[in-house]
């Protein structure tokens, strides 16, 4: 459902910024408002009027495809989507909507062809990698799906969807370090959604499993780690005795602080990493504890978290203001999981 609202919002923005004749723009804006209200019949009437004026207008045709999609009239959505992707100014969203329509009728082969074609035109298209991986997973092509999401993370590092899918995948595979790596980047890129809370809980489970001092993973189940992961795991290994009697949120805070200190001392030149610089900044600002509470507090226990918020109101407020005042961006060139 969140994906649909994101698409609809993007379509509304596109209507507002594209240079079009006033009448077409007026019909499109009316259609978008009607779609948001769930009045698809009258939305389609407005879109058809816009199309009559400019038959090759991408936004109009794309909106027609999406309007049919929302009504679960997938054959019509596909017909309109095919027209949209043939236009010279077809964008990622055109391919996304058509691919979603094919996936809705379980025609994953057709969807995958659309995504492959889209990636030739948009080789760093984060949303296309995300959708393509989801389609591959529906065909039970797990290895191809995760490789697709990882490539999306590498080439479109500030698009959140690939991190989300990868974190969920690695959670099922019990690859805890990758749950933490991808999960924490995800919650910084997408901080206020239902998916955010889902990934926060997965991250806490990852810490609990990764830091258990006694349990050893059978050799054949141990993933092949990249050097970037091994260096983090080596630091985490030193902390296991610290949590021998149980993991608390205070433990997590001190463990993550140790990870940061050792990383910046020994590995930062080889592996510069924006997330760790982000941690450093929050430590200097005195809000790193509040950040860790935001990540894990509610998962440890809502009552204890609310108590912490009430007794640390100033720090909590400062963190919230900081978080809401900036948009986290993960730079390119910092993908180290090859």
Image: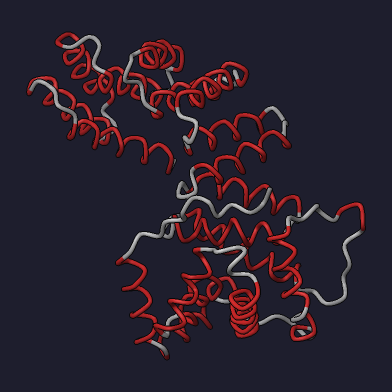
- Rendered location of residue 127, percent (x, y): 47, 37
> In the image as oriented, which residue stretches furthest toward the left?
22
Horizontally, is 104 left or right of 258 in the view? left
Is residue 9 shown above or below 287? above
Q: How many marks?
A: 0
316 left or right, relative to 36: right
Q: Which residue is pictured at 55% across the width and 40% down the height?
A: 152
Q: From the top left corner, tell me how far across and down residue 67 is, in percent.
A: 33, 23
In the picture, measured across the screen, residue 154 lies left or right of residue 30, that is: right
**Which image quadrant for residue 231?**
bottom right
Answer with the quarter of the image where residue 206 lies.
bottom right
Looking at this rendering, what residue extends furthest in the bottom direction? 311
> As drawn, which residue projects farthest toward the right?
219
- Which quadrant of the rendered structure holds the N terminus? top left
Q: Nearer the viewer, residue 253 or 6?
A: 253
Pinpoint residue 332: horizontal percent, then vertical percent. 49, 50
Q: How is the image coloured?
A: secondary structure
Q: Quadrant of residue 43?
A: top left
Identify the residue at image location x=11%, y=26%: 26
Q: Position of residue 169 (x, y in %)?
A: 67, 47
- For this rendering, which residue is in front, 271 or 242? 271
- Seen from the viewer's position, the closer of residues 28 and 151 is 151
Q: With respect to residue 330, does 162 lie above or below?
A: above
13 in relation to 47, above or below:
below
């Amino acid at each position: 459902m969140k994906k649909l609202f994101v698409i609809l919002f993007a379509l509304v923005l596109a209507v507002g910024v594209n240079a079009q004749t006033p009448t077409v723009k007026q019909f499109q804006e009316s259609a978008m408002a009607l779609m948001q209200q769930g009045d698809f019949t009258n939305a389609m009437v407005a879109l058809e009027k816009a199309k009559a004026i400019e038959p090759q207008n991408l936004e109009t045709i794309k909106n027609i495809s999406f309007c049919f999609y929302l009504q679960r009239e997938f054959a019509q959505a596909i017909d309109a989507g095919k027209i949209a992707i043939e236009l010279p100014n077809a964008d990622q969203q055109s391919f996304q909507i058509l691919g979603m329509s094919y996936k809705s009728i379980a025609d994953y082969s057709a969807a995958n062809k659309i995504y492959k074609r889209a990636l030739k035109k948009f080789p760093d298209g984060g949303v296309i990698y995300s959708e393509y991986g989801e389609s591959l997973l529906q065909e039970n092509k797990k290895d191809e799906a995760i490789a697709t999401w990882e490539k999306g993370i590498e080439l479109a590092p500030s698009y959140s969807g690939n991190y989300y899918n990868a974190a969920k995948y690695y959670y099922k595979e019990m690859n805890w370090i990758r749950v933490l790596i991808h999960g924490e980047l995800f919650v910084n890129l997408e901080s206020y959604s239902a998916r955010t809370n889902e990934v926060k809980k997965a991250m806490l489970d990852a810490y609990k499993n990764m830091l258990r001092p006694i349990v050893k993973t059978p050799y054949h189940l141990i993933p092949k780690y990249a050097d970037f992961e091994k260096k983090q795991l080596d630091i985490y290994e030193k902390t296991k005795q610290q949590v021998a009697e149980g993991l608390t949120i205070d433990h997590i805070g001190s463990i993550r602080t140790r990870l940061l200190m050792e990383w910046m001392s020994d590995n930062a030149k080889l592996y510069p990493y924006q997330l760790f610089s982000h941690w450093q900044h929050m430590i200097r600002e005195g809000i790193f504890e509040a950040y860790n509470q935001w990540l894990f507090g509610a998962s440890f226990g809502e009552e204890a978290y609310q108590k912490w918020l009430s007794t640390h109101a100033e720090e909590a407020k400062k963190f919230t203001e900081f978080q809401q005042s900036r948009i986290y961006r993960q730079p390119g060139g910092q993908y180290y999981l090859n």
